[in-house]
Amino acid sequence: MRTTTVRVPAKINLSLGVGPRREDGYHPLATVYQAVDLCDEVRATEVDGDSVSVEVHFDGDGWREQAPVPTDENNLAVKAALALRDAFGVKSGAALSIRKVIPVMGGMAGGSADGAAALVACDALWGTGASRAELEEIAAGLGSDVPFLLHGGTALGGGRGEEVSPVLARGRFHWVFAIADHGLSTAEVYAGYDARHADAPPPMPEVPPTLLTALAAGDAAGVGASLSNDLQPVALALRPELRDVLAVGEQGGALGTLVSGSGPTVMLLAEDADHSAQLARMLLAEGVCVDAVQATGPEPGAHLI
């Protein structure tokens, strides 16, 4: 049986500006994505017949296995495979196997990453010969973060997040991710954001120019000072214990601390690899998270297409 395996990075939002809810239910976003070398792995294997199935394996501690990852057509990797098949009239099926490392419901687009990886893996398995533009179009229909996960690196996100353009970023950035023992619903966070702005809609979002300048210069301290997330107040209201994580990061001299996306993962920017290890030890010693994962970004060669 032929098989194709694709590794796909997690994403973080260095800035996440959120505008007023649109009529289609989405929000206009102005964000800076960055891929980090915390990767899921998706394997696609040919099967007899036209079925598309998925199995999920968790990498690491046993608590991860409690994460609610669907293993039916609601899994985004399955949706991606079916969307690709429909777009190109493929008659074959595939058995998908996902090795999960990216936190589930952690604000790091683990599901979107698996969808992007499944697109690339099944494209190779079935020999559809899809162009970059065709894969991007399918990805945009799957979710706002999926197109970026096809690209990796560092990029601006516009529209509802699906409009991606590269950003100049020099150097490597050292991150620590404080992982919570259970996830936070993106839908719940956005509902809370809308409730907070029920009387006065938020302005149209913009990316802080200071962040783009710091990225172009490879200035980690400048990046840390420019981190921003419009969803953070809602995430903190839903999960007040995340404030303790932010406090430990500040005490440990992190260059910047921020809730990642819709949370509950908190990201801390370190000065270097040694400082990253020190922050991870502090977080675990204080008991403010179930795991502290070190990563760097962007990973060279992380682009999927």
Image (cartoon, grey):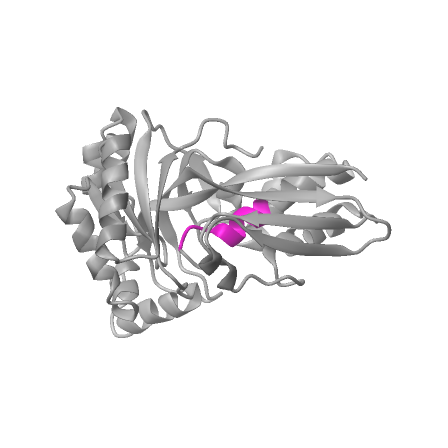
Using the image, determine if residue 231 lies above or below residue 122.
below
Left or right of 254? Residue 304 is right
Instruction: Give the main secondary structure of the magenta stretch.
Output: helix
Residue toward you, 28 or 298: 298
- Whether 115 is among the magenta residues is yes
Asked if 296 appears above or below 56 in the picture, the reply is above
Which quadrant is the N terminus positioned in? Answer: top right
Residue 255 position in % (x across, y down): 19, 39
Is residue 144 shown to the viewer in this render?
A: no
Q: Please identify the residue farthest to the right as the structure is shown.
A: 48
From where the camera sits, is residue 63 visible?
yes
Nearest the eye: 228 or 4: 4
Where is residue 33? Give x, y as percent.
Answer: 39, 42
Q: Position of residue 66 (x, y in %)?
A: 50, 64
* 80 left or right of 109 in image: right
Position of the C terminus, as image quadrant, is top right
Q: Measuring 65% from the left and 38% from the top, which residue is drawn there?
A: 5
Q: Quadrant of residue 105?
A: bottom left
User: Does the magenta portion include 13?
Assistant: no
Q: Residue at x 26, y 58 (%)?
A: 288
Quarter of the figure with residue 200: bottom left
> What's drawn in magenta, residue-wise?
107-116
Residue 12 % position (x, y): 38, 45
> Viewed as shown, does residue 305 lie left or right of 300?
right
Q: Residue at x 27, y 37 (%)?
A: 276
